[in-house]
Image (tube, rainbow, N blue to C red):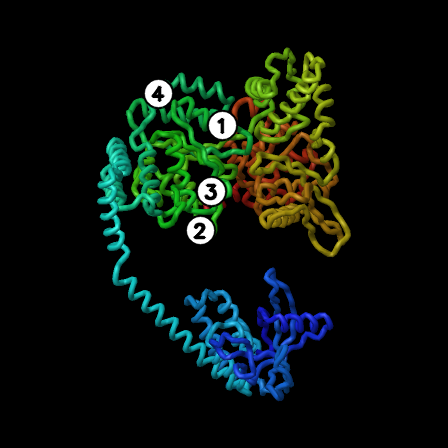
Amino acid sequence: MPGALLPLLVTNPASIRRIQELHSKGEALVAVAMRTPGDLHQATWDNLHPVGCIGRITKLTETESGELSIMLKGQDKARLKRKVNEKPRLTAEVETVTDNLTPNREALALAHASRRILEQMATLSYHGMESIIANLAKIKDPLILFSTCATSLPFAAEKKQQILELDTLAAKFDLLYKTLKEELDILELSSSISAKAKSEISSAQREYYLRQQMKTIKKELGEGADSESELDELAREIQAKNLPEVVQTEVNKDLRRLERMQPGASEYVTIRTYLDWIIDLPWNEVSEDNLEIDAVETTLDADHFNLKKPKRRILEFLAVKKLKGELKGPILCLVGPPGVGKTSLGKSIAHAMNRQFVRISLGGVRDEAEIRGHRRTYIGAMPGRIISGIKQAGTVNPVFMLDEIDKLGKDVHGDPAAALLEALDPEQNNSFVDHYLNVPFDLSQVFFITTANVIDDIPHALRDRLEIVEIDGYTQEDKLKIARDYLLPKELDANGLNDLSTNFSDAAIKELIRSYTRESGVRSLQRQIAAVLRAIAAKVARGQDGPEEVDCAFVGEVLGPARFSPETRQRISLPGVATGLAWTPFGGEILFIEAALIESRDEMILTGQMGDVMKESARIALSVVKSLGFNLPEGKTLHIHLPAGAIPKDGPSAGITLVTSIISLLTGRTVRQDLAMTGEITLRGVVLPVGGVGEKILAAKRTGIDQIILPKPNEKDLHELDAEARAGLTFHPVETIDEVLKLALPELDLPTGLSVAEYPTGLASAAAASQTV
């Protein structure tokens, strides 16, 4: 067809020579016509159709047998005008025929109908050309669609010749559409005949007869005993597990199905794998708890320093179980910054209680099937992480740690946090159903421990099932003891220095804590100790003597200049700078708030990546300052900045710090350098309670600040801190902003008549009234 490509194989030696001659001269045009179908003789004038096509040879390749493979692209329709020669090859004079190929409405409609036919043919088996036909159905140009279909599709050659001889596009498409419709009818009829034949003999009947025949054949040959003995052994193993009744019923069904199957069947492997899981699970295996309270406490103290809250809760659990004899496992959630020992505490608890320990990390888990397993509807299905962990433990009462529960994700595959609700509910986890097992499993004896950095990121419904145990960061004294008693022995062994008589001085450890780490936990401290010991190991490996004592000078030589330095006094030595306290998922931090007056049309400029809540606190702070009688100079704008501008900051707890910074700027007085503060402020100057007080206090102590202002309602949080953490610190509980200003700016006199104390009802009374409301 004109416009289409057609591969041809040329076998006539004379034609091969002529084509090669034309191709070498760059004259690649030939006239092609179709022979009568079924005629195997050489082409003659008698068996050739008089209407054909002028084609251009676009590609020429010689085969190994000496034949010629060419690619023709149709250019113009041609008709035989005069016969010139018959030997050594057919030579003729032809004339081109111009058809009316303008796509009118009828042609476009027929093209659209032809595409629909092609789409239906693509769903059936048509000469193995399903993908080619699907691509043809996507062709929009009617001319390209017509020429490609007529050339490429293997329907009757006579039909193709008739289509070529027609002289209008509508007529050509009409015949093409009818031809495609006939092919589609034949395909549909063939498909229905095949379906009818298959339905007459069902696969189940066929398998049954074949299976019976195979059993008879194997019995005659003395074979088949192996598979039967294997199934008998499997049945005995299942019987020995003493499964619950509902599980035994389900397993018996699968055993009966397995007996009727051929071992080579794919479903046989699926059922056998399922039964292996049933056998491997510890349905009744229980490890005996160590209920000696003093011995457990000794083990916990030997593994971890401090951490009194979680240790106390474990001892309480064991005490109740010892008295009652049976107790459902609690669901603890250890919340604290990284590096304080949450994960390692789980191992210590399992060791102290004489239980198996299983840990799975939930960070980044987004698929519900990771928790509840995949259904047995496809090859490769498997149970979820909880059931896999129980199999790994080998007992029904392990210590099961779900690490990083606050970092669960959620996507189109479901919500894994919602899937955990059943497993972590003591009232219903005695019948936890994994999608793969599809039978209940008792998790009530499992001691679940979860860990998190941020409690607010745990979904509320899940958080309601957890017993929250907050773990605060360590003080410098705590870190010194941990490094001396726990980290150093571990790293000396890890670096092969157990036999070395090198002493790591307390001064060097304090230098590491103060100048090279700034964290709530001890993970970074452990890395720095390891770095110092590796430097000693390198010396010893070269045959040199290591230092007799690791002091501050050696630490500086190995680790370089100090990374952190006390900077509070330098940064708040000017008016307009105040020190606040902030909470982060990685522990407490000090927060500097700077205020300045600049030329601008705006009333206030806020920078430092403040969140919406903190921006509102800044506006409230400015209103409180104005209500106290401190007005901005004419034409000046207040600019408030929070350094470390690349770090996002949010929350209301910087309210009193913002007020203090602004008043310090407007009065030209500097804030006390040994003072840090935290508390939310209201428009009436009332100081409201905040969270994370423990971590904030530890951050202030690490920085060398010993005077701390905090809201009066947060006094209760001080009792949860150890005496060592509170040692050397002075706390100033406040209720109103005037108390804050008297402490932070002791020489400041509030304007007469506008002081907080001068309000008609008194600001403290207003605070009490607001609480009543």
Q: Which residue lies under the disc numbered 1?
A: 344
Q: Quadrant of the N terminus?
A: bottom right
Residue 720 lies, with reference to residue 504, above or below; the image says: below
In this picture, is 183 found above or below 624? below
Give how far apart the Cα atoms at labels 3 and 2 are.
19 Å
Question: Of 747 and 128, which appears nearest the observer?
Answer: 128
Separation (CA) of disc 2 from disc 4: 43 Å
Going by the numbered disc 4, the residue's amino acid type is Leu
Q: Determine the secondary structure under disc 3.
A: loop
How far is the residue under mark 2 from the one under mark 1?
A: 31 Å
Q: Which residue is mark 2?
A: 413
Distance from the alpha carbon under mark 4 to that under mark 1: 21 Å
| Residue 98 badge | none
Mark with earlier residue (4, 3): 4
Closest to the camera, between mark 2 and mark 1, is 2
Mark 1: secondary structure:
helix
First reached walking from the N terminus: tag 4 or tag 1: 4
Q: What crowding class fits label 1: few (fewer than 14 Cα within 10 Å), some (14-19), or many (20 or more)?
A: few
Q: Is 714 above or below relative to 609?
A: above
Which residue does the numbered mark 4 point to in the structure image? Answer: 291
Query: Which residue is denoted by mark 3 in the rendering?
Result: 458
Return the x and y of residue 500 as percentages of the image width and height: 63, 12
Extreme right residue here? 599
Residue placed farthest to the front in the image? 87
Callout 1 touching callout 3 (CB < 8 Å): no
Query: Quadrant location of residue 735?
Result: top right
Mark in the foreground, 2 or 4? 2
Label 1 or label 3, whichever comes before in sequence order:
1
- Residue 717, image x and y in percent? 50, 32
Q: Hey, which quadrant is residue 727 in on the image?
A: top right
Coordinates of residue 35 in the picture (x, y in percent): 53, 78
Amino acid identity at mark 2: His
